[in-house]
Image: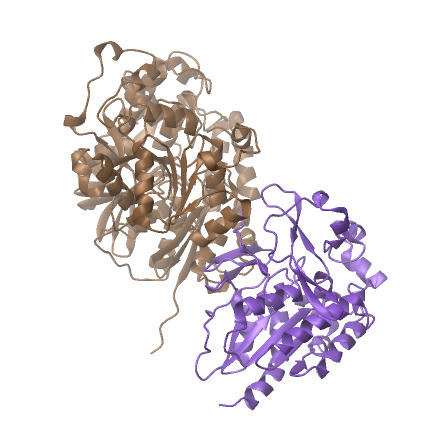
Chain colours: A purple, B brown
């Protein structure tokens, strides 16, 4: 019933279907999606040169950045354009991806463009996605569980080694995976079965509150292999840029609503401030400035993606940093 | 100077049958679709959440940009009629009341909540009256500045038939016939009695009529309906069950026509053929009389029609040939789905005062108001599933191949452009065949449509070649007029077959040099194809003519029996694989059946998926 939104791509795994224009049904009623000719959910077409007189920002991230759950115009990237005059944002956000795929998206689609700033939005959960080799999904046609291979990197002797290039096209049944690969499917966190049961019983919020479940423990140690991989990807990516980068970690709702601790992931991302040309913009303080009882409004009733209110907050937070770059840019 | 904000109105018809939604911007039709196309449930009556979603997506507007949502009838007035009927109908009406009130109290009175849920926003909600919506759906998109309006259906709130007048942006209803006296219900009573489904089988009854003789017409006039000279009528309720029971007819009705009703799917006998011919004849008499009265009281030279009875294209053809009006325009979604269009237009012009502009062509946009799927979307779908296809972006090369396949007798599924709004496929979601071949009708009926084979297929003809094939005065872009095949093309029916009870024997006899689309009485339900409305289909017809000398194609809806017409590429592919179609055209992609992977589902899976209509 829903329209197909994505098409296969051998390097990044997939991207949006170019030129798509539709409304996606959602618990909010629905949201408007428009995809540019390059296959990204962006109101602007991708052109090699920026619009004269503008400050061009390339924006990368996952569904929080692509805008699952909200119309194009309500996404923080689009709101940012309204808050900082003269900025044009090319949104390369791609739902369901990890930072690894976002880096590949940059290389494949954006590296040759003219730009003034790159914003890499890292939903903190992405640390789990970058170590996964597969992502699970439910096939719409057969209603069966499938896994789809994704591109990924391993860190070998300090160097990033790409895998699944080209990305295998066909999805497979989980039971068809080789034994060695069965643990490499992103299950959305630890204790997958228990979480499924708790969610089915409608006890997610209660369980979260009382257990203080930590959704992303890979940030706990600076030498955690997943963090080292994340750091390596971001280092390599930002090294390749022709302009400054802003890395923006985006918290999960457990962090925003303070049922999970944020110290570890914030500390890890703060370490990146020392990288050449990199500014870390952490929007978390702006989230927690909002009274706790209002923060529930930053996600939908069931869908944990940001609501328009959350997007506005992120945009407002990010605008402070972006303005500094715009003001310092040569005219 | 700043441009003023556009007026957006969303029309909704729902909760009876054929739910639909329509979006109008500044009085222009932007999008319209029936819910069944998305849910894959034929005549889906549920609140049209998916159709609304599509309309907002097509218009690319947020709910808060809507000036109003308009529901196509007035639930409280309908409830008033249901209560009155129950009180008047005595004990037997209880069942009727329970059924109707369940729908009304359970859903219709809570339209506001359903709208809020579908939109995720509060938008002003208006209710219009059912026949006002039908009238608006007929008049506003028509190419007439001024016209008589005739609406006829089963029942709205109270009205079953109205005569009105439209002028500029104004509509005025002048006369009405009220429930239980209903031409639509009369026709449906015969539909049910002949073993077909009410609200969908009326078309079959109409297709059956040419096989029979109107031997019961006198009995119908004498016992069932009293028709006055002005076309107004009263039913004799002693013969009907729809007021005081759950049945359309009763024992007296059966006794009048020689015994009990035909059981669904059983053999069709001479009696059903004659009953079909009889009720068709009476219906045509009434339609013509009403039209003549409408002309008289409105003084209008042109007329517009809507309501379920206006889908009776045989009656429409007779009305056109009768010359009562200079010109006729019929809303292609004449049934309840079209109420969404009327409701939206009524609010736009009637409430918000959006000026109406009348052009040389109508404002229905060929009724291509549904979703389209781009080549990129289609290729993404085919690639995702690994279905083999040829991508042929060059339209001329593509048409050459499609026309050649048709000329070889192959059956082609054709998906191109925006889906049609209304019950007819008009070359956007169609199954096409060669009309010259004697075996096309049988092949398409039995191998593709899986349905009764007495029903003829409809022809699509190049508009500029129409007169060479059909005795049709003017155009028929929406397949709503039946016209005779030109006399020079007709073939006589062998004498011995004239009175046979075996319809299949009759069907197998070629009736013209385009036998697949010629009915037993030499009639055809014509679609004229104009290059301005549907350039891709026009070009395909032109190529078929270039290759074969024939400017006609068989055009039937892209579905199997009981299935809603396909909407998305996945629906089309599924239907393609479930039937014996040879070639599938999905925009600029061509799929050969023999190249496809073997289907994973049982061959007759559709039989369990769709309830037979």
Q: Is residue B240 left or right of residue A82?
A: left
Residue B331 occupies quadrant: top left
- Of the pair B202 and B187, the residue shown nearer to us: B202
Residue B248 position, x and y percent, is 44, 25
- Of the pair B404 and B79, the residue shown nearer to us: B404
Q: Relative to A60, does residue B288 appear above or below in the rendering?
A: above
Residue B332 occupies quadrant: top left
Q: Is residue B480 left or right of residue A48?
A: left
Q: Relative to A246, does residue B385 appear above or below in the rendering?
A: above
Q: Is residue B38 left or right of residue B521?
A: right
Q: Relative to B27, does residue B576 appear above or below in the rendering?
A: above
Residue B339 position, x and y percent, is 39, 46
Residue B252 position, x and y percent, is 41, 16
Q: Residue furthest top?
A: B496
- Report the residue at 29% width, 23% height from top: B438
Q: Total label count?
A: 0
Q: Residue furthest front?
A: A157
Report if residue B541 is visible in the image: yes
Screen quadrant of the N terminus of chain B: bottom left
Q: Relative to A210, does residue B134 appear above or below in the rendering?
A: above
Q: Residue furthest right?
A: A211
- Of the pair A33 and A114, the residue shown nearer to us: A114
Residue A81 position, x and y percent, is 52, 77
Report if residue A307 is visible in the image: no
């Amino acid at each position: 019933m829903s329209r197909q939104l994505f098409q296969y791509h051998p390097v990044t795994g997939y991207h949006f279907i170019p030129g798509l224009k539709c409304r996606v049904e959602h618990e909010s009623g629905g949201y408007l999606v428009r995809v540019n000719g390059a296959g990204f959910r962006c109101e602007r077409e991708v052109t090699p040169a920026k619009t004269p007189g503008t400050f061009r920002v390339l924006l990368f991230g996952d569904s929080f950045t692509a805008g699952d759950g909200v119309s194009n115009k309500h996404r923080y990237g689009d709101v940012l354009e309204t808050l900082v005059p003269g900025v044009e944002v090319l949104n390369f956000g791609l739902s369901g991806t990890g930072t690894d795929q976002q880096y590949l998206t940059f290389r494949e689609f954006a590296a040759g463009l003219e730009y003034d700033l790159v914003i890499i939005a890292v939903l903190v959960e992405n640390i789990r996605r970058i170590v996964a080799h597969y992502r699970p999904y439910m096939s719409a046609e057969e209603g069966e569980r499938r896994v789809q291979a994704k591109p990924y990197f391993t860190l070998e002797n300090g160097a990033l080694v790409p895998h699944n290039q080209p990305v295998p096209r066909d999805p497979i049944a989980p039971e068809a995976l080789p034994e060695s690969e069965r643990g490499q499917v992103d299950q959305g966190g630890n204790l997958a079965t228990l979480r499924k049961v708790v969610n089915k019983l409608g006890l997610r919020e209660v369980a979260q509150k009382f257990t203080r479940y930590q959704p992303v423990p890979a940030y706990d140690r600076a030498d955690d292999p997943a963090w080292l991989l994340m750091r390596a990807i971001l280092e390599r990516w930002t090294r390749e840029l022709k302009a400054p980068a802003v890395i923006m970690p985006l918290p999960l709702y457990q962090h925003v609503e303070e049922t999970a601790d944020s110290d570890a992931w914030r500390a890890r991302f703060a370490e990146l401030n020392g990288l050449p040309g990199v500014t870390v913009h952490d929007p978390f303080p702006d989230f927690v400035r909002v009274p706790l009882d209002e923060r529930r409004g930053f996600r939908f009733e069931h869908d944990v993606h940001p609501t328009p209110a959350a997007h506005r907050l992120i945009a407002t937070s990010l605008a402070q940093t972006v303005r500094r770059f715009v003001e310092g840019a040569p005219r | 100077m700043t441009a003023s904000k556009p007026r957006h109105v969303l029309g909704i018809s729902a909760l009876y049958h054929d739910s639909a939604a329509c979006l109008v911007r500044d009085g222009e039709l932007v999008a319209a679709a029936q819910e069944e196309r998305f849910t894959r449930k034929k005549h889906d009556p549920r609140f049209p959440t998916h159709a609304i979603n599509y309309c907002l997506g097509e218009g690319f507007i947020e709910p808060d940009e809507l000036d109003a949502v308009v529901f196509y009838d007035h639930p409280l007035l309908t409830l008033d009629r249901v209560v009155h009927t129950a009180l008047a109908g005595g004990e037997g009406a209880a069942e009727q009341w329970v059924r109707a009130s369940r729908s009304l109290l359970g859903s219709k009175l809570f339209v506001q909540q359903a709208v809020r849920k579908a939109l995720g926003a509060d938008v002003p909600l208006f209710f219009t009256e059912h026949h006002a919506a039908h009238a608006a759906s007929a008049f506003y998109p028509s190419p007439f500045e001024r016209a008589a309006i005739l609406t006829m259906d089963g029942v709205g709130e109270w009205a079953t038939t109205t005569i009105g007048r439209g002028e500029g942006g104004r509509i005025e209803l002048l006369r009405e016939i009220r429930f239980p006296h209903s031409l639509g219900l009369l026709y449906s009573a015969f539909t049910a009695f002949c073993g077909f489904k009410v609200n969908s089988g009326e078309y079959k009854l109409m297709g059956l009529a040419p096989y029979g003789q109107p031997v019961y017409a006198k009995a119908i006039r004498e016992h069932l309906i009293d028709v006055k000279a002005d076309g107004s009528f009263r039913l004799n309720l002693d013969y009907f069950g729809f007021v005081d029971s759950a049945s359309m007819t009763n024992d007296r009705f059966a006794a009048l026509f020689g015994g009990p009703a035909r059981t669904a799917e059983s053999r069709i006998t001479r009696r059903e053929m004659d009953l079909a011919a009889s009720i068709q004849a009476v219906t045509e008499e009434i339609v013509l009389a009403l039209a003549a009265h409408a002309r008289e009281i409105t003084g209008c030279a042109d007329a517009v029609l809507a309501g379920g009875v206006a889908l009776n294209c045989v009656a429409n053809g007779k009305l056109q040939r009768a010359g009562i009006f200079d010109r006729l325009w019929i809303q292609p979604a004449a049934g309840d789905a079209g109420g969404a269009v009327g409701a939206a237009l009524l609010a736009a012009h009637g409430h918000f005062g959006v000026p109406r502009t009348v052009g040389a062509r109508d404002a229905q946009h060929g009724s291509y108001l549904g979703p389209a799927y781009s080549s990129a979307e289609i290729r993404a779908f085919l690639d995702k599933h690994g279905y083999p296809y040829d991508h042929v972006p060059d339209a001329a090369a593509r048409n050459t191949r499609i026309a050649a396949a048709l000329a070889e007798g192959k059956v082609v599924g054709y998906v191109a452009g925006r889906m049609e709004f209304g019950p007819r496929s008009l070359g956007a979601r169609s199954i096409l065949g060669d009309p010259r071949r004697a075996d096309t009708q049988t092949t398409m009926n039995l191998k593709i449509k899986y349905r009764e084979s007495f029903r003829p297929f409809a022809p699509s003809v190049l508009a500029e070649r129409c007169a060479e094939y059909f005795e049709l005065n003017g155009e028929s872009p929406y397949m709503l007029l039946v016209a005779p095949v030109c006399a020079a093309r007709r073939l006589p029916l062998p004498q011995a077959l004239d009175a046979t009870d075996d319809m299949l024997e009759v069907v197998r006899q070629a009736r013209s040099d385009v036998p697949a689309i010629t009915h037993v009485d030499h009639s055809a339900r014509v679609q004229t194809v104009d290059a301005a409305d549907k350039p891709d289909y026009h070009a395909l017809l032109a190529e078929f003519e270039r290759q074969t000398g024939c400017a006609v194609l068989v055009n039937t809806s892209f579905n199997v029996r009981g299935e809603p017409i396909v909407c998305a590429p996945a629906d089309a592919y599924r239907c393609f694989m479930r039937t014996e179609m040879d070639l599938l055209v999905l925009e600029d992609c061509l799929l050969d059946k023999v190249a496809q992977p073997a289907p994973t589902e049982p061959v007759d899976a559709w039989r369990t998926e769709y309830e037979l209509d």
